[in-house]
Amino acid sequence: MPGRSRTAIPVAAATVFTLALAACGQDADNEAEVAGSDAPDASDGGTGAVEAEDWTGKTVTLEQPAERVVCLDGTCIDALAELGVEPVASLQIDQVQHPYFFGPDAATQALDGTFFEPSIEGIVAAEPDLVVGSAAVHGELQDALGDIPFFGVELSDDGDAEDNLQRLAVLTDRQDEAETAVERYRSTLADYQPGARATSVLSMYGGATNDIGIDALDSGIGRLLARYTDYPWPAAQEGESGFLEIGLEDIVAVDPEHIFVLDFAFDPDAPALVEQLEDEPIWGTLQAVRNGTVHVVDNAWWGTTSGTRGEQLYLDVVMPTVYPDEFPEPLGIAAP
């Protein structure tokens, strides 16, 4: 199963990639200026109506920049952390309180319900100026939210993370913070030097051995890792959002050198996913298992976000782990 082809010259690739990001950023800046043309300049500290187009094509208009935001997904938390706007309520409270985002002292309230069925009563009780969530999953909540504005997110291409951040910066009047975050994001991605590397990598997930999958080539993590590592995995089927159910036999057929495992830990009384996998004889045939290069990732944020902060963190974990001679320490958000 071949991965996406990439140039074999990392420095040249980094240059091209940085220019491409800059072009995307300029386009996003232009969109943000148009979308927020009625808004005051953030540096003036003024207030007024702001508007931006969400990822369904709907224009979201606010009478004033949003100060109270409810996050229904991790990409929202990611963007707000970049902008310095603590959410008033969130489903993913562990991510909010993680040191890479708002830290353990965050005042964000935990929202009841599940990712697929968040508590409408809890959202309304938080008195938000804006609710941000997955367009595909949470878009149907708009009627139940009444007059509360909803911004739907659906990131599927390179450059979307930066574009999304800039749109939310308009709605929160945090363009200066967005500019600083984008500069760091571009710098981190360029410093990791996109290009072909020999060592094969897999990002997989699950809660039990009979329910595992991988971040496919067209997932946010898959697209990112394919630009920096050897990521020899297929794309998912249309409508699967980049997540691909797969059997251990398929993983063994590729036999990746490093495996990053996200354990959903749905059942707190069940053994850890890696412990369950160790009971499967076929798991032990993998070179990553034999060589001790299976890495359990932090389920507070891994896989929850496709934002600018998350992309840096994925690389901060993977690149120093897989290529320690090239990257002795993280270069982005997790940099010492």
Image: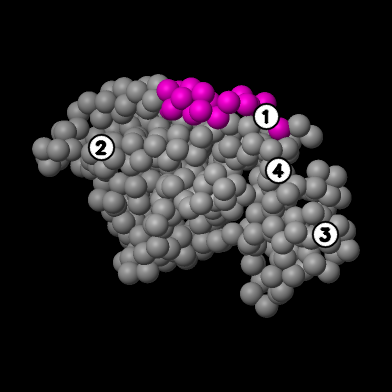
Q: Residues within 10 Å of mark 2 (few under 14, many from 20)?
A: many
Q: Residue at x 14, y 38 (%)?
A: 43
Residue at x-position 25% and y-position 30%: 36
What segment carries the magenta color?
A: 3-21
Q: How many marks?
A: 4
Q: Between residues 138 and 197, which one lies in front from this camera angle?
A: 197
Q: Residue at x 51, y 28 (%)?
A: 11
Please report whichever mark, 3 or 2, sits nearer to the chain's N-terminal start: 2
Q: Nearer the viewer, residue 200 or 158?
A: 200
Residue that badge 3 annotates: 283
Percent x, y of residue 206: 70, 58
Query: Does 135 appear in magenta?
Result: no
- The residue under label 2 is which amino acid type? Gln
Mark 4 falls on what kind of element?
loop
What's the amino acid at mark 4? Answer: Ser
Q: Nearer the viewer, mark 3 or mark 2?
A: 3
Figure quadrant of the C terminus = bottom left
Q: Secondary structure at mark 1?
A: loop
Q: Is residue 177 visible?
A: yes
Mark seen at residue 291: none
Which residue in the rendered view is the most extreme toward the right?
A: 281
Do tag 3 and tag 4 residues touch (Cβ < 8 Å)? no
Q: Which residue is mark 1?
A: 4
Q: Looking at the image, is mark 4 or mark 1 nearer the viewer?
A: 4
Q: Which residue is mark 2?
A: 175
